[in-house]
Amino acid sequence: MRNETLLEIKFSLLEMKKTKKINFGILTNLSNLGDLLKNIKSKWLKIKNYDWFYFYQYVVTLEFTLEQMEYRFKNSQSQMISKLSMIP
């Protein structure tokens, strides 16, 4: 699942870059990746060694990045809807 989700995100981003259009299907993939990161983070919290902290911080940073990506895609969707509703 992890590899499929990452590949789908990659191809969605490349396609959006190519077509200059937003594919809101990416939101599902970003959410799935966020769930995966939460599971990984919870496992690392159970590990009691010194190396886990670096990995944990890496995952926290990734979660923040994903949240910002989701916010921007959702915000662009609402902006698009509001612009379309203004068309007579």
Image (cartoon, rainbow, N blue to C red):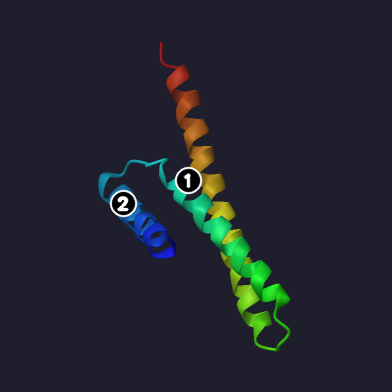
Tags 1 and 2 touching, CB below 8 Å: no
In this rendering, position of residue 13 left or right of residue 66: left
Which residue appears at 41% of the width and 57% of the height?
Answer: 5
Residue 57 at x, y percent in the picture: 65, 74
Name the residue that disc number 1 marks: 27
- Which quadrant of the figure contains the N terminus? bottom left
What residue is drawn where x is 51% and y is 58%?
Answer: 33
Q: Report whether 82 appears left or right of 20.
A: right
Relative depth, front residue between 14 and 85: 14
Q: Where on the picture, by quarter, is residue 24?
A: top left
- Identify the residue position indicated by label 2 in the image: 17
Question: Looking at the picture, which amino acid does disc 1 mark?
Answer: Leu
Q: Tag 2 or tag 1, which sits nearer the N-term?
A: 2
Q: Position of residue 70 (x, y in %)?
A: 53, 48
Which one is in front in this view, the residue at disc 1 or the one at disc 2? 1
Relative to 8, does residue 21 appear above or below in the rendering?
above
**Up-down relation of residue 86 to residue 40 (above or below):** above
Is residue 43 depicted above or below 25 in this figure?
below
Residue at the location (65% across, 71% down)?
43
Q: Nearer the viewer, residue 11 or 79?
A: 11
Q: Characterize the local packing of mark 1: few (<14), some (14-19) or many (20 or more) Cα atoms within 10 angstroms.
A: some
Q: Quadrant of the C terminus?
A: top left
Label 1's element? helix
Q: Secondary structure at mark 2?
A: helix
